[in-house]
């Protein structure tokens, strides 16, 4: 799809606008997150801990998927359940 943009100088330029949405995706279920982490295109997992929440972010080829866990015990269990071949980085 092409989008016509008017500039300040009165020119018109055409820009290609992708119809796909490349925003990060949020996963709400632990089971769905584990299935996503086991996919072939999953590269790495980053774990970000804050006061109230632990965020697990898995990088796949197209999207970054995020799971927010509010229980630290569940977060520790989830960390142990991650696939062994996946690189895990704590931030």
Image: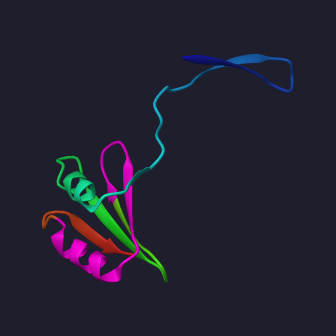
Foreground: 86 or 26?
26
Q: Position of residue 68 (x, y in %)?
A: 40, 66
Quarter of the image where one finds residue 90: bottom left
Which residue is at the far left? 84
Q: Position of residue 8 (x, y in %)?
A: 86, 27
Quarter of the image where one finds residue 56: bottom left
Residue in the image at 29% along x and 82% along y: 73
Tell me, yes or no, whether the highlighted magenta stretch contains residue 76: yes
Q: Is residue 74 left or right of residue 66?
A: left
| Quadrant the N terminus occupies | top right
Residue in the image at 33% along x and 54% along y: 59
Q: Is residue 14 above or below residue 38?
A: above
Q: Is residue 24 above or below residue 7?
A: below
Number of numbered discs: 0
Foreground: 71 or 39?
71
Which residue is at the far right? 9
Residue in the image at 25% along x and 54% along y: 32
Tell me, yes or no, whether the highlighted magenta stretch contains residue 88: no
Q: Is residue 8 above or below residue 74?
A: above
Q: Is residue 31 left or right of residue 61?
A: left
Q: Is residue 19 left or right of residue 59?
A: right
Residue in the image at 27% along x and 57% along y: 33
| Quadrant the C terminus occupies | bottom left
- Scheme of image coloration: rainbow
Q: Position of residue 22 (x, y in %)?
A: 46, 40
Magenta-colored span: 58-82
Q: Position of residue 65 (x, y in %)?
A: 37, 53
């Amino acid at each position: 799809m092409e989008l016509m943009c008017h500039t300040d100088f009165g020119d018109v330029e055409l820009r290609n606008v992708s119809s796909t949405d490349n925003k990060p995706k949020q996963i709400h279920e632990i089971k769905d997150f584990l299935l996503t982490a086991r996919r072939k295109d999953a590269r790495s997992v980053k774990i970000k801990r804050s006061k109230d929440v632990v965020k697990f972010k898995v990088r796949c080829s197209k999207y970054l998927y995020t799971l927010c866990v509010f229980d630290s015990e569940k977060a520790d269990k989830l960390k142990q359940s991650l696939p062994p071949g996946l690189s895990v980085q704590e931030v």
